[in-house]
């Protein structure tokens, strides 16, 4: 009897042992299949990404030089350019181009390249300023972590078009999980391979990359207007992936640099004007004390929100502080996704009394321009086909801002939609719905 029980127990143990072995074998087999699937998926998507990227790079390189006038440029120091012109300057502001550069964004990247090329070919600007988010390396939409791929597509396109350009970095250009840092991408853009790119790292003692000043200088060595480009950074307060929309503000040392730079510009102009004969100097009386400036950045200043909320609270009507020039707000939620903290940039702009206009991007469905306490705050139309769900099917928000500076430094600008007939594209334009934005 005892022997029988021992035999049964042994048999049970063997059965359990056999089952454990079978489970381990099954788990191991499943694990191997998962690894094989991941390997094959990675290989296939990598191959598709490489082929698609090469195809779009070839397309970018296939656009023709637009024939913009070639200006004399001088680079006196890191972060500064002098652009010599007696006729002023024509600038196109582009924003939120969102080139994915991965296997999931091949078709939409082609659309974005097509749109940018059509706009620049028609406008023939002297300079293009891209206010952030050129690249969009978000893997669930682009299919890659490689932010240099989108950057390369844009750089190759701009070199083909033969137009000088620079940029302010956006939050998506260098994500926390991207392959390349801001410094890496800054160095890539500013390499000798892309001589039309005017981006420089900027002063080393202030936060960010690409903080720089571009002066329009005439033959009397008088600065008629300066463009100040600032890095508005990315996410803060532990929101490293940006899922809580906690955006950064300009840093105090950037604001101090801005203020000090304007003082230096004013000194330069006074010296240049003092060297002219009296009659000629009188022509520049408006520029004697202060150089007019425009600021470009990606993330809007908090005052964009203050201005819009005041306008809305007044029944979508102008107030003493806010006067709508054009456009509307089409975003939902907070409407204006500015930095989560207050900063004193706007107050400093008011104090130095030099900056009369600010241009930003970031919020793709906002395209308004308002005069707020004497300073024009303007959103550019965006290019994005990728980031916002379904945005490739919508067209009201897609385009640019055309900025004209006359020979005296006075500025005039307007929004331009991509789908107008005069923007003739190399490849057929997609069909879109021209949706209504906002409530006003």
Image (cartoon, rainbow, N blue to C red):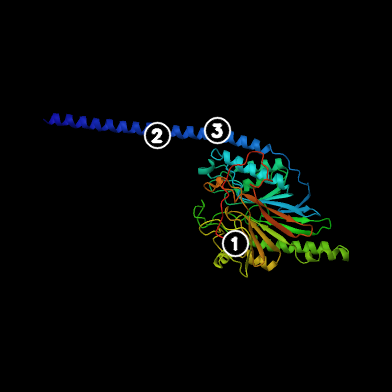
Q: Position of residue 406 (x, y in %)?
A: 77, 57
The alpha-carbon separation of the residues under discs 1 and 2 comes to 53 Å
Say which label, 3 or 2, has the lower sequence index. 2
Q: What residue does disc 2 label?
A: 31
Q: Is residue 431 left or right of residue 229?
A: left
Q: What residue does disc 1 label?
A: 304
Residue 322: mark in rendering = none
Q: Is residue 147 left or right of residue 164?
A: left
Give SS at disc 2: helix
The alpha-carbon separation of the residues under discs 3 and 2 comes to 24 Å
Q: Are marks 3 and 2 in contact (CB under 8 Å)?
A: no
Q: Quadrant location of the N terminus? A: top left
Give SS at disc 1: helix
Q: Nearer the viewer, mark 3 or mark 2?
A: 3
The total of numbered circles placed on residues is 3
Q: Nearer the viewer, residue 69 or 75?
A: 69
Query: Outermost residue, left direction?
Result: 1
Q: Position of residue 126 (x, y in %)?
A: 74, 49
Q: Position of residue 113 (x, y in %)?
A: 63, 42
- Picture quarter containing residue 227? bottom right
Local crowd at mark 1 within 10 Å, few (<14), some, or many (≥20)?
A: many
Q: Is residue 22 left or right of residue 154?
A: left
Say which label, 3 or 1, has the lower sequence index. 3
Residue occupying image coordinates x 78% and y 61%: 268
Q: Nearer the viewer, mark 1 or mark 2?
A: 1
The alpha-carbon separation of the residues under discs 3 and 1 comes to 44 Å
Q: Is residue 210 above or below residue 291?
A: above
Q: What residue does disc 3 label?
A: 47
């Amino acid at each position: 009897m005892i022997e029988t029980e021992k035999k049964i127990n042994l048999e049970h143990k063997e059965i359990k042992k056999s089952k454990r072995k079978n489970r381990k074998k099954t788990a191991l087999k499943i694990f191997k299949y998962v690894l094989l699937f991941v390997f094959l998926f990675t290989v296939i998507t990598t191959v598709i990404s490489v082929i698609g990227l090469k195809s779009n790079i070839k397309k970018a390189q296939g656009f023709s030089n637009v024939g913009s006038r070639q200006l004399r440029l001088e680079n006196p120091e890191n972060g500064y350019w002098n652009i010599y012109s007696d006729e002023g300057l024509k600038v196109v502001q582009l924003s939120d181009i969102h080139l994915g550069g991965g296997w999931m964004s091949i078709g939409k990247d082609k659309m974005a390249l097509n749109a940018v090329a059509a706009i620049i070919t028609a406008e023939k600007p002297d300079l293009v300023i891209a206010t952030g988010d050129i690249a969009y390396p978000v893997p669930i939409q682009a299919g890659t972590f490689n932010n240099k791929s989108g950057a390369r597509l844009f750089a190759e396109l701009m070199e083909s078009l033969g137009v000088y350009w620079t940029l302010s970095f956006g939050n998506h250009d260098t994500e926390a999980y991207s392959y390349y840092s801001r410094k890496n991408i800054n160095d890539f853009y500013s390499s000798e391979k892309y001589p039309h790119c005017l981006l420089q790292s900027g002063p080393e003692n202030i936060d960010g990359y690409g903080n720089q000043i571009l002066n329009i200088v005439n033959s009397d060595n008088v600065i008629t207007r300066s463009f100040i480009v600032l890095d508005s950074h990315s996410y803060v307060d532990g929101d490293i992936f940006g899922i809580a929309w906690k955006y950064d503000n300009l840093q105090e040392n950037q604001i101090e640099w801005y203020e000090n730079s304007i003082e230096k510009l004013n000194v330069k102009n006074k010296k240049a004007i003092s060297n002219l004969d009296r009659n000629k100097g009188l022509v520049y009386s408006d520029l004697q004390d202060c150089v007019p400036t425009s600021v470009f950045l990606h993330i809007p200043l908090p005052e964009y929100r203050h201005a819009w909320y005041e306008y809305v609270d007044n029944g979508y009507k102008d107030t003493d502080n806010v006067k709508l020039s054009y456009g509307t707000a089409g975003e939902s939620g907070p409407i204006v996704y500015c930095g989560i903290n207050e900063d004193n940039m706007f107050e400093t702009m008011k104090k130095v009394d030099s900056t009369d206009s600010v241009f930003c991007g970031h919020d793709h469905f906002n395209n308004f321009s308002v005069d707020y306490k004497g300073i024009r705050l303007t959103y550019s139309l965006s290019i994005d086909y990728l980031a916002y769900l379904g945005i490739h099917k919508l067209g009201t928000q897609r385009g640019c801002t055309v900025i004209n500076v006359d020979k005296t430094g006075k500025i005039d600008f307007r929004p331009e939609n991509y789908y107008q007939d005069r923007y003739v594209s190399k490849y057929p334009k997609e069909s879109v719905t021209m949706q209504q934005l906002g409530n006003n």
